[in-house]
Image: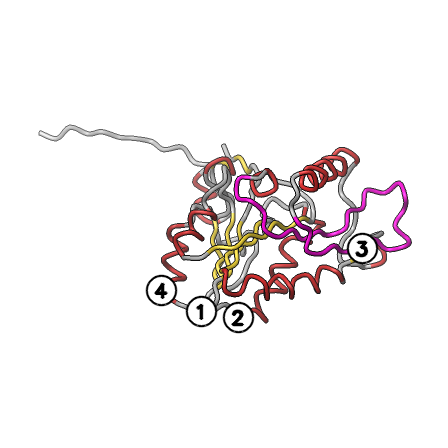
């Protein structure tokens, strides 16, 4: 049996990260398919020393994002149905009620149908770790950013949800890359890149509430096999 049950995947950005490479990937990881992917990079953990500069740069990118009819080839199309649209709106309303600051919003194209399920991209900052916005899978183009001071705090925040599907680590320190990758509890960890699956040869699946079992690779094939034990007494 294989169960893939979603995630609240973190992108961890250390102060030595190559931001020119990281920022476009971070944006794409949350707006791809309007955020409706199990592996969406929906939490952004940034080291305190570069936190404000990273968020300012991301805010500029978010303001340029547009959602609208798919045939226009914009950054995002619609959410899948009314139920999902209303769920995202409820989560955003709760974030507003909780006083979480909005860093930037994208926009809707003028041709977006008034009855369509279009949601602009939203970047939140200073999201409390235990707030539902940092714990609940939104399944929409909503990025929750929070700062960290140390490597240990980054790992604790990354592991501090019920999920464990994918994680991204952005640092040029080779030792840190491996240390953090080993300690983050996620089925896939990407270092200085981010995605889901990464090819048919790489097993994909989660830990904790993100599911059970693996797809793809030899690990995926094992789910279709039955283990047989043969015990022979000699002598």
Residue 234's mark? Answer: none
Which of marks 3 and 1 precedes in the sequence?
3
Does residue 57 appear to the left or right of 11 in the view shown?
right
Residues at circles 2 and 3 in contact by the CB criterion of under 8 Å: no
Which of marks 2 and 1 precedes in the sequence?
2
- Distance CA(mark 3)–CA(mark 4): 41 Å
Q: Is mark 4 on a helix, strand or loop?
A: helix
Q: Is mark 3 on a helix, strand or loop?
A: strand
- Distance CA(mark 2)–CA(mark 3): 28 Å
Q: What element carries label 1?
A: loop
Q: Which residue in the protein does label 2 denote?
A: 18
Q: Which residue in the protein does label 3 denote?
A: 107
- Distance CA(mark 1)–CA(mark 3): 34 Å
Q: How many marks?
A: 4
Mark 3 or 4: in front is 3
Which of marks 3 and 2 precedes in the sequence?
2
Residues packed near mark 1 inside 10 Å, few (<14), some (14 to 19) or many (20 plus): some
Residue 175's mark? Answer: 4
Which of marks 4 and 3 precedes in the sequence?
3
Task: Give above or below for 136 relative to 119.
Answer: above
Give the extent of the magenta segment.
Answer: 101-130
Residues packed near mark 2 inside 10 Å, few (<14), some (14 to 19) or many (20 plus): some
**Residue at left 49%, top 32%?**
1
């Amino acid at each position: 049996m294989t169960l893939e049950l979603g995630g609240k995947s973190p992108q961890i950005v250390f102060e030595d990260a190559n931001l020119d490479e990281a920022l476009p990937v971070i944006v794409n990881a949350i707006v791809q398919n309007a955020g409706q992917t199990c592996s969406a990079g929906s939490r952004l953990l940034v080291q305190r020393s570069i936190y404000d500069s990273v968020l300012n740069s991301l805010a500029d990118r978010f303001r340029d994002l547009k959602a609208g009819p798919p045939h226009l080839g914009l950054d995002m199309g619609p959410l899948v149905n009314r139920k999902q649209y209303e769920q995202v709106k409820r989560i955003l309303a709760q974030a507003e009620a909780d006083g979480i600051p909005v860093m930037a919003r994208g926009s809707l194209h003028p041709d977006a149908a008034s009855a369509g399920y279009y949601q602009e991209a939203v970047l939140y900052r200073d999201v409390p770790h235990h707030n539902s916005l940092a714990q609940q899978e939104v399944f929409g183009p909503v990025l929750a950013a929070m700062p960290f001071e140390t490597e240990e705090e980054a790992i604790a925040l990354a592991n501090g949800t019920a999920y464990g599907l994918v994680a991204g680590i952005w640092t040029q320190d080779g030792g840190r890359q491996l240390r953090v990758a080993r300690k983050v509890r996620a089925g896939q960890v990407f270092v200085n890149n981010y995605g889901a699956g990464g090819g048919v040869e790489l097993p994909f699946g989660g830990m904790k509430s993100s599911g059970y079992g693996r797809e793809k690779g030899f690990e995926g094939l094992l789910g279709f096999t039955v283990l047989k034990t043969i015990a022979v007494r000699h002598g």
